[in-house]
Image (cartoon, rainbow, N blue to C red):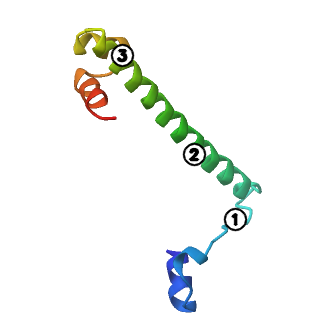
């Protein structure tokens, strides 16, 4: 919202506006900004790992389908539902 406000009020393109949040110490916690940045980086890393795991699961599921392994068995192997196996093997 801050980016949009700045862009509109200053007549800048939205993609030209960046906001860098810094937090003042809160109580006895003086490293809020650094900890927030660490959490954001960890979330990005987790999302990337999740995407990679999904891609690997889809590849294995497709290979197992090609080997005539039943979809319910593939779900049990991967620890996911047979419906999810169907989703993974139906799209590329």
In the picture provided, is 29 more to the left or to the right than 9? right
Coordinates of residue 81 in the picture (x, y in percent): 27, 22
Q: Earlier in the sequence, mark 3 or mark 2?
A: 2
The nearer-to-camera label among 3 and 1 is: 3
Q: Quadrant of residue 30?
A: bottom right
Label at residue 15: none
Q: Is residue 16 above or below residue 76?
A: below
Q: Earlier in the sequence, mark 3 or mark 1?
A: 1
Label at residue 23: 1
Q: Earlier in the sequence, mark 2 or mark 1?
A: 1
Distance between the Cα atoms at labels 2 and 1?
21 Å
Residue drawn at 27 percent across, 8 percent down:
69
Residue drawn at 60 percent across, 77 percent down:
16
In the picture provided, is 42 more to the left or to the right than 57? right
**What residue did someone put label 2 on?**
44
The nearer-to-camera label among 3 and 2 is: 3
Q: Quadrant of residue 91?
A: top left
Q: Is residue 1 above or below residue 73?
A: below
Q: Is residue 15 above or below residue 42?
A: below
Distance between the Cα atoms at labels 3 and 1?
49 Å
Residue 79 appears in the rendering: no
The answer to which of 53 and 31 lies nearer the viewer is 53
Residue drawn at 67 percent across, 53 percent down:
37
Quarter of the figure that contains the C terminus = top left
């Amino acid at each position: 919202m801050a980016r949009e406000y700045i862009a509109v009020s200053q007549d800048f393109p939205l993609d030209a506006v960046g906001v860098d949040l810094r937090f003042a110490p809160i109580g006895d916690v003086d490293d809020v900004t650094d900890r927030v940045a660490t959490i954001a980086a960890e979330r990005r890393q987790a999302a990337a790992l999740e995407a990679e795991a999904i891609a690997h699961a889809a590849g294995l599921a497709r290979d197992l389908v090609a080997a005539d392994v039943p979809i319910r068995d593939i779900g049990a192997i991967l620890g996911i539902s047979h419906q999810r196996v169907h989703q993974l093997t139906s799209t590329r």
